[in-house]
Amino acid sequence: MTMKLSTDPSAATLLPIAKKEGISTVWDRHRAMQPQCGFGQLGVCCRICWKGPCRVDPFGDGPQRGICGADADTIVARNVIRMIAAGAAGHSEHGRHVALALQGVAEGRLPAYQIRDEAKLRAVAAKLDICTEGQDIPAIAAAVAKATLEDFQNQDHDAPCNWIEATLTKKRLERLQALHVLPHNIDAVITQIMGRTLVGCDADPVNLILGGIKGALADFNGMCLATELSDALFGTPSPVITAANLGVIKPDAVNIAVHGHNPLLSEVVCEVAGQMDEEARKAGAPAGINIVGICCTGNEVMVRHGIPLAANYLSQELALVTGAVDAMVVDVQCIMPSVSEIGACFHTAVITTMAENKIPGATHVDFKEETALESARRIVATAIEAYKRRDPRRVNIPDFKQTAIVGFGVESVVAALATLNAEDPLQPLIENIANGNIRGIALFAGCNSTQVAQDSSFVTMAKKLAANNVLMLATGCGAGSFAKHGLMTQEATLEYAGDSLKAVMTAIGTSAGLNGPLPLVLHMGSCVDNSRAVQVAVAVADKLGVDLDQLPLVASAPEAMSEKAVAIGTWSVALGIPTHLGTMPQVTGSAKVTELLTQTAKDLLGGYFLVELDPNLAADKLLEVIEERRKGLGI
Ligand code: NFS
Ligand code: SF4
């Protein structure tokens, strides 16, 4: 019997077409890779030096130490914290990029960008304790950029990064400080992980994992600043009705898929596409230009502008198999290198844009903020040219799309609640948690993985938690799953929410002018926007005078795969949140590291990893955790 590859209906339509065309997809390559290496799965394979590779025999018959003498605990701990460092590097590079753009805007060097949300910029300045009195917007932007860039430069080990200090509860900061895991400088912390994991350095698994936790908190810091500064530059999300799944691709338009992560590129492409619509029509596309999103940059433009989402991670190749994507424009992260080859099977221009992220076979259009408009025009013109080569006989757009109400940042959640209680917007939420109408809050985050039938664990868990009156937030490819499967609709709330949750969602949605309930799962944005969920949690904790590890709050990455997800999961644990993983983390070759992350962390931090591959059981376990937390609070 073959395992189901994806529960996305588009996959069922397009996989046979890929097969007929001789195109191999991520699922074909997954099958060809079986059986996967057991040592790697357990995390006990070390390739840190050229005496290796070494692997420790988990069953005890073979070698128990690598050639240098490192045992399984050391090897596993080094491997996993290097993954955290990579994840933190990705998010923080993204954040640095946005911070430098903000600085450029402040100095008037970047004509393609402006501060679209001045109120947000002021709010950020206030949060960072920057005095704005009598200052104009460019001056405030410059000060915010400076304070942010300090988080990449500060050399004083005792002075934590500005953003993390401004973001967490006081109790949490003290707890992290006591463990010496508060980052002082994102770059330094990442470098330190690489340095301490060289051959012949840190061999103590506990010490290594603590270093990894610090790296994960640096990741959190990078995500917070990326989210908030992007809001200042591009606007803070507010609820918008849009659509998701491959049916958002239009047969009679020039379709441009924006794929990757950083809104600095996708925002300008969207803007320029609007200006070049007429050219597309002249080229024979009656519907003009249609931008669709893939992965997290898709989430960014979705929550800010209602741009429809075509695909999450695992179906990025299928977007190309529709034969109707004229250009796929990519920047950084989560872009399968296979896309250039598949694009070449069709007429599709796959366009890379970042000097440090190229793909053989793709067209490269160098994108710099200084000349963003010119580059974006070249990109859109390339898409229009490609459209002229499209073969209509090879177009197969699946007839699947779902409505999605998205765009729930902290501000819009608070605004919706304020329609019930203008003076004290959080009160209605807290009241409903306290009286049990809402049992707890779950944040769904993270990727798709070929280890799980695409989207299935997200959807199964969400339906069960909804029935048990858990309020759900989502980001990243998790949010993509829910949007594609129709769980970001009012109908889903009516169908799946338990009675008390339904009543609360209806009360809030109706008073906020949505003419019905809030959608079942609230889309908060991309992966870096997990920071938004933390902000909501911190506000609730502060109001109750408790810390994050006391709240009936859980996180779940049921289909995690990326090193970024490893970093996010680890900071989630460090913030005190029980964090579910639905794929097997590559650490189980070390009993010590496994125990640290799933048990000892609970005592040290309040949060811990909970690994459960079965989504039904995982939902049950999270419900138990929520009830345990409620008991702790006496509610
Ligand atoms: Ni997050 Fe976004 Fe998706 Fe996973 Fe990749 S796109 S940053 S890493 S796969 S959720
Ligand atoms: Fe082997 Fe040690 Fe080198 Fe790792 S660092 S490859 S365990 S000799």
Image (cartoon, helix red, strand yellow):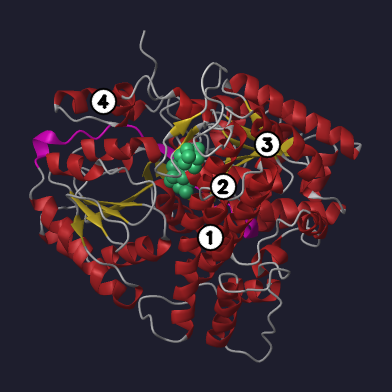
Separation (CA) of disc 2 from disc 4: 32 Å
Q: Which residue is at the front of the view, 52 or 527? A: 52
User: First in sequence: mark 4 or mark 1?
Assistant: 4
| Front of the two marks 2 and 3 | 3
> What amino acid is labelled 1 in the image?
Thr
Q: Residue at x 81, y 39 (%)?
A: 603
| Front of the two marks 1 and 2 | 1
Q: Residue furthest right?
A: 634
Q: How many marks?
A: 4
> What amino acid is labelled 2 in the image?
Ala
Q: Which residue is at the front of the view, 269 or 499? A: 269
User: First in sequence: mark 2 or mark 4?
Assistant: 4
Residue beneath disc 4 = 15
Q: Residues within 10 Å of mark 4 (few under 14, many from 20)?
A: many
Residue beneath disc 2 = 567
Q: Residue furthest top?
A: 1
Apparent side of residue 458 relative to residue 310 in the rendered image (left or right): right
| Front of the two marks 2 and 4 | 2
Residue beneath disc 1 = 191
CB-based contact (under 8 Å), mark 1 and mark 2: no
Q: Quadrant of residue 532?
A: bottom right
Separation (CA) of disc 1 from disc 3: 22 Å
Q: Residues within 10 Å of mark 1 (few under 14, many from 20)?
A: some
Does the magenta portion include 54? no
Q: Residue at x 84, y 35 (%)?
A: 630
Q: Magenta residues, as a range?
A: 391-412
> What amino acid is labelled 3 in the image?
Leu
| Front of the two marks 4 and 3 | 3
User: First in sequence: mark 2 or mark 3?
Assistant: 2
Residue beneath disc 3 = 597
